[in-house]
Image (spheres, helix red, strand yellow):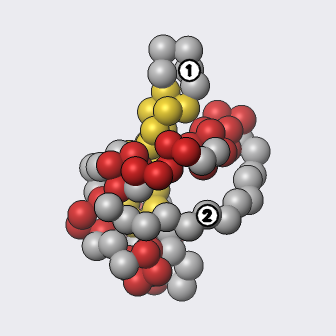
């Protein structure tokens, strides 16, 4: 089991695509309202220009203030809650 975990962690860390793992935050009506960065890989840092150490533990709305004006949180929430894959393209200027 440990070998499998190490293998997937290595794939995550060394992936060419920027990737992050989040925890979704729901309101009192179980609607997605934010998400927290739990982990991100090196490519996330290279592609966004944001240091991974600066986002871990922060809410998306703190890192990307403009995210509230998009459907991105709703899209992530749908993926998490319904298990449905989503595809989207957005551009944010980090704060």
Q: Secondary structure at mark 2?
A: loop
- In percent of width and height, residue 37 lies at 37, 53
Depth check, mark 2 against mark 1: the one in front is: 2
45, 1: nearer the viewer: 45
Gap between marks 2 and 1 measured at Cα: 24 Å
Tell me whether circle 2 and circle 1 mark residues in contact (CB < 8 Å): no
Rendered view: 10 above or below 38: below
Q: Secondary structure at mark 1?
A: loop
On the image, numbered disc 1 is attached to which residue?
30
| Residue 62 visible in image | yes
Q: Is residue 82 left or right of residue 53?
A: right
On the image, numbered disc 2 is attached to which residue?
90
| Residue 80 visible in image | no
Q: Is residue 2 left or right of residue 90?
A: left
Q: Residue furthest left?
A: 53
Rendered view: 90 above or below 74: below
- Crowd band around label 2 with a 10 angstrom C-alpha radius: few (<14), some (14–19), many (20+): few
- Crowd band around label 1 with a 10 angstrom C-alpha radius: few (<14), some (14–19), many (20+): few
- In percent of width and height, residue 36 lies at 38, 46
Of the two numbered discs 2 and 1 on the same chain, state the one appearing first in sequence: 1
- In percent of width and height, residue 52 lies at 30, 69
Residue at 67% across / 65% down in the picture? 89
Quarter of the image with the C terminus in it = bottom left
Rendered view: 45 above or below 52: below
47, 68: nearer the viewer: 68
Residue at 56% across / 67% down in the picture? 91
């Amino acid at each position: 089991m440990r070998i499998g975990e190490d293998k997937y962690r290595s794939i995550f860390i060394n992936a060419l695509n920027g990737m992050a793992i989040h925890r979704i935050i729901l309101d009192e009506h179980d609607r997605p309202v934010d998400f927290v960065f739990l982990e991100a890989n090196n490519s996330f840092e290279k592609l966004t220009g944001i240091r991974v150490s600066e986002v871990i533990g922060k809410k998306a709305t703190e890192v990307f203030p403009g995210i509230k004006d998009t459907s991105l949180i709703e899209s992530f929430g749908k993926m998490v809650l319904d298990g449905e894959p989503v595809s989207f393209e957005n551009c944010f200027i980090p704060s």
